[in-house]
Amino acid sequence: MHVRSSGVQPRPPADPGTPPSSTARAGYAVIAVAVVAVLAVSVWSLLHSGLLGRTPEPSASATVAGPAISSYAEKAKRLTWEPPELTSPETILITQKNRRLELLPDRDYRIVLPDTPITLDGGLEIRGGRNVVLFGGEIVVPPESEAPKDSERTGLLLKDQFGTAYVEGVKISGQDLAEGINLDQRYGATVILQNIEVGLVHGSYEGHHADILQTWAGPRTLLVDGLRGTTQYQGLFLLPQQFIDEEPERFDLRRILIVGDTSGPEGKAAYLLWTDAPATWLSTQDIVLVDPRDDLEGMIKPYGPWEDGVRLSKTTDDAVLPAGTPGVGYVSPGYQGEAP
């Protein structure tokens, strides 16, 4: 950074080649003797007390420094990944008549939900676009009496992005919600979902196989941090190669809470976690399944890829989630800045 001169010239440094005067040398000698004497007394005291050569024990009242704890706690509340940078984005406001978007593949977009919950027949569909960001708001699907097809009661579809599809702080609800979020990504996109809440999705073995989050094609990279949802049937149904051959690079799932609901026709949910086997691209951390059943393997298919980072609980209190409440008026807790 260039700083403008104030007109006052700084004092030139002393010439390192000029020796100190004799008076200065005498003063230095007196100081040196005093320092040696102080050190000698200190070393004798330490030897006498037995403290030299060992680490002293902390006192009973000693605590870890407050700022360090505060810093760690604040970081833990934040989301893992930042939104992508947008280049000259176009802003699109979602309305009941403008809920099925066809976006240009080489352009960035900012999608905005209204500042009140909006009922969308068929949910919100975002097709195309390069980098697409959706931040905050609530999508409500209509009741089954008004929207009998399951596809009309899906909250969000992300399809065919070419860069990064980023969704944060969104709530999806509806008294007959059938699907939470569906992904159809055949062009190598990255999908980032953070602080998402999905209401109860309704389904059964004989009827609609409801999912909180489902993918049947891609994405190349899926990053999830802070997803919570309730299901009568399935939770995360991840088959990224169901309709394409390309294997994903990375599915990183963190801080997820899935509640298996017992109000469906079967009286229990089905598999709460389902994916391909083997799934070497899958990593999990702090995934909590809340379900009255005691057999974790009966809720996971196949068990191997989900074994690490997943646990069964009887209460939602055990879940570790980031700060921030999804929906209208959402405020982001900030980001830890980890690279996608």
Image (spheres, rainbow, N blue to C red):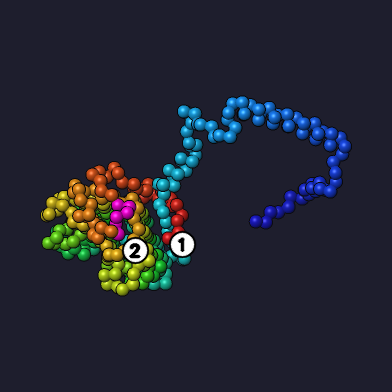
115 or 7: which is nearer to us?
7
Specify whether residue 309 is painted magenta: yes
| Tag nearer the camera, 1 or 2 | 2
Q: Position of residue 147 (x, y in %)?
A: 17, 61
46 or 82: which is nearer to us?
46
- Residue 85 is marked as 1
293 or 138: which is nearer to us?
293
Asked if the residue at tag 2 contacts the one at tag 1, i.e. Cβ–Cβ closer than 8 Å, the answer is no
260 or 103: which is nearer to us?
260
In the shown orientation, is residue 88 left or right of residue 199? Answer: right
Q: Quadrant of the C terminus?
A: bottom left
Inspect the image, locate mark 2, and give the three-letter code of the amino acid beneath it.
Thr
Write the start and end of the magenta stretch as one range. 305-310
Q: Position of residue 135 (x, y in %)?
A: 37, 56
Inspect the image, locate mark 1, and give the three-letter code of the amino acid beneath it.
Glu
Spatial CA distance of label 1 from label 2 is 29 Å
- Residue 280 is marked as 2
Using the rendered image of the protein, determine whether residue 38 is visible from the camera's viewpoint.
yes
Quadrant in the rendering for residue 126: bottom left
Q: Position of residue 183 (x, y in %)?
A: 30, 65
- Residue 282 is marked as none
Q: Give the mark nearest the N terminus, 1 or 2.
A: 1
- In terms of secondary structure, where does tag 2 sit? loop
Q: Residue at x 40, y 52 (%)?
A: 79
Q: Residue at x 42, y 56 (%)?
A: 81
Using the rendered image of the protein, determine whether residue 116 is visible from the camera's viewpoint.
no
Question: How many badges with numbers are in the image?
Answer: 2
